Every structure is written in C-alpha cells, then in structure tokens.
Amino acid sequence: MPQTGNVLPSFLDDLPVAQAAARFAAEQHRGQRRSSDAAPFILHPFEVASLLRGRGFDDEVVAAGLLHDLVEDTPATLDEVCRRFGKRVGDIVAALTEDATIEDHAARKAALRRQVAGASPEALAVYAADKVAKARELRAEASHDPAGLGAESARLRLDHYRESLTLLEQAVPELPLVAQLRFEVWALEHLPPERGGET
C-alpha cells in the first residue's frame, strides 16, 4: 500500500488528533485493499473522516472516523486506541466495533445496530458517515457488475444499510448525514448503475 507518510488530506489541517489518527490508521491498515476498487483500504477511513469534517465535527470525532475499523480489521486493540487517543475516541470506536464472536452475518450486524443505538450522538454520526461511504462503495462495485446487486452478499449489505438508516432516523433524525444516507440507499434502490453508461 502506498504510504501517506507526512502527506495527509488537506481537510485534516489544524486537527492534530485526527492527523495522528490518520498516520496510525495508515500504518495499521498497511497492505489492505478494499474489494470495491482495490484502492488502499485507508481510503475508506479517509472518506468517513472527510464526511465528518465537512459536517463540522470536531478533531476527536474526525479521529474516531479514521479509526473506526481498526479493532475489527487490524491487530490494534481498543485499549491501545484509548491509550493513544483518549476515552472519548475509544468509546466511539468501541461502539462501532462488531462482536467477532457472532458468526452469523445478519445476527452480527443486528447486534452492531443495537450497540450503536445506545451510543453517543457522535458515535451515531461516525456510523452514519461509514454507511454513506459504504453505500457509495456498493454502487461503485455495481457499476462494474450490475448483476452483482442481485447477489446475496449485496442484498445483505443493502438490507443492513436500510436497517441502519431506520435506526439513525429514529435516533438522530436531524443529522444531515442521515439525509445523505437516505439518498444513497434510495439511489441504490431506484437508480442502480448499468454497465456502459455515459462518462
């Protein structure tokens, strides 16, 4: 994976905690690629953090957006996140971390939604930003293989995004990221990509 090194996206300017989180996340996610486009995985946390920054969230919430997949997908532990970035960031990351002991996909996602439902408004915002980014990734995947939206894995993901939207509409209906997620889900349902569209 290419190194971000000291070169970070400009939206992190003046956010020292998020800058440290970005470097730590890039180091921990080194070598990982995302399935939607084979880009370095760190692009996903950057997308989440950018959505949060664009909606005016503070340094620690943006940092949590950068770290939200760390405990699930890397050797980093929650204790390490708390020690490096503080309890507030650690609590947000904990709220967004799935229980890996639940093997069934649907049950694991349902448990995650219940966990998030009882979390702070900031954790709900990070969760919403994550789902916006993930819905966009699903649309990007479908642009390469439109039939893929009919596959069971894609249906499960879209079901999870719908259920997440319902949760967020009940918990934080005023959050602009909820409106964004509502649009992303609507677009997947009503305007799915087709191969060979205009550029």
Image (spheres, helix red, strand yellow):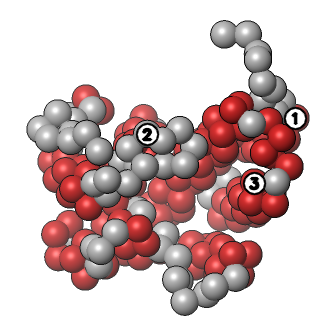
Q: Which mark is residue 39?
A: 2
Please, what is the three-letter code of the amino acid marked with disc 1? Answer: His
Distance Cα–Cα, label 3 vs label 1: 15 Å
Which secondary structure, mark 2?
A: loop
Residues at badges 1 and 2 in contact (C-beta under 8 Å)?
A: no
Mark 1 and mark 2 lie on one chain; the one further toward the N terminus is 2
Spot the residue most to the left: 6
Residue at 54% across, 89% down? 101
Residue at 66% across, 10% down? 199
Distance Cα–Cα, label 1 vs label 2: 27 Å
- x then y, percent, for residue 43: 40, 42
* Crowd around label 1: few <14 · some 14–19 · many ≥20 (10 Å): few
* Crowd around label 2: few <14 · some 14–19 · many ≥20 (10 Å): some
Which secondary structure, mark 1?
A: helix
- Image height check: is 10 above or below 40? above
Q: Which residue is mark 1?
A: 190
Distance Cα–Cα, label 2 vs label 3: 19 Å
- x then y, percent, for residue 69: 42, 63
Q: Which residue is mark 3?
A: 154
Residue at 83% across, 30% down? 191
- Image height check: is 171 above or below 27? below
Q: Nearer the viewer, residue 135 or 120?
A: 135
Residue at 37% across, 73% down? 71
Side of 66 where 193 appears, left or right = right
Spot the residue most to the bottom: 101
Rendered-image quadrant of the N terminus: top left
Please, what is the three-letter code of the amino acid marked with disc 2? Answer: Ala
Side of 107 where 71 appears, left or right = left
Side of 19 where 150 appears, left or right = right
Which numbered mark, 3 or 1, is in the foreground of this view? 3
- x then y, percent, for residue 37: 53, 38
